[in-house]
Image: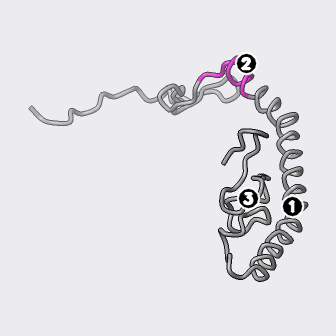
Amino acid sequence: MHCTRCKTDFCYRCGDRLRKLRFFGDHYSKLSIFGCKYRYKSDKPLQRKLIRGAVFGGKLMVAPILGTLGACAGAIALGFGIFILPVYGGVRLYQKFGIKHPPFHPRFAMPQPMFQFSNEMPVMVNTNRPLQPRPPLWAA
């Protein structure tokens, strides 16, 4: 409900002011210390306070650990953004606009000759024997 005189939000069942903290819950949460007493174990106030206090204590103990993990994750993300991304971007730009190498594909490869002739090793040809034609593969 909303008070028209002081503009305060309050619970219509218990009359308490509505409070909300992100990590600890609000008035409508069952296990929050700010929760409505009629929302969770209204007939057992001591048990309700003990359970809500234990949950609050657990959250209070976990909050610094989560804060530290968040700070570490932020530092890692910042380091990644400052050092790794520029190097990666430079490599990608070099690959895109740098020296163009022809693509290697067997189709583009130069055929290798069966024999290589060079000045170092002269070709030995028998000039004493005349060349003879081959016989035909099939007879006509």
Magenta stretch: includes residue 93:
yes
Please provide percent x and percent y for residue 135: 24, 33
In the rendered view, tell whether residue 38 sits above or below residue 18.
below
Please provide percent x and percent y for residue 4: 71, 39
Which segment did they paint magenta?
92-102
Image quadrant where residue 115 sits: top right
**Given the image, on which type of amino acid does mark 2 rest?**
Gly
Please provide percent x and percent y for residue 79: 88, 40
Foreground disc of the pair 3, 2? 3
For mark 1, does the 10 Å Cα neighbourhood hold few (<14), some (14 to 19), or many (20 or more) residues? Answer: few
**78 relative to 28 in the view: left or right:** right
Camera-nearest residue between 110 and 41 = 41
Magenta stretch: includes residue 132:
no
Foreground disc of the pair 2, 1? 1
| Upstream in sequence: badge 3 or badge 1 | 3
Q: Looking at the rendered structure, which numbered label has been put on residue 63?
A: 1
> For the residue labelled by badge 1, is the local secondary structure a helix, a strand or a loop?
helix
Q: Looking at the rendered structure, which numbered label has been put on residue 52?
A: none
Instruction: Name, please, the residue furthest toward the front.
Output: 5
Q: CA distance from mark 2 to mark 1?
A: 50 Å
| Upstream in sequence: badge 2 or badge 1 | 1
The residue to which callout 3 is attached is: 15
| Upstream in sequence: badge 3 or badge 2 | 3
Image quadrant where residue 59 sits: bottom right
**Given the image, on which type of amino acid does mark 3 rest?**
Gly
> For the residue labelled by badge 2, is the local secondary structure a helix, a strand or a loop?
loop
For mark 3, does the 10 Å Cα neighbourhood hold few (<14), some (14 to 19), or many (20 or more) residues? Answer: few
The residue to which callout 2 is attached is: 98
In the rendered view, tell whether residue 78 sits above or below residue 61.
above
**134 relative to 79 in the view: left or right:** left
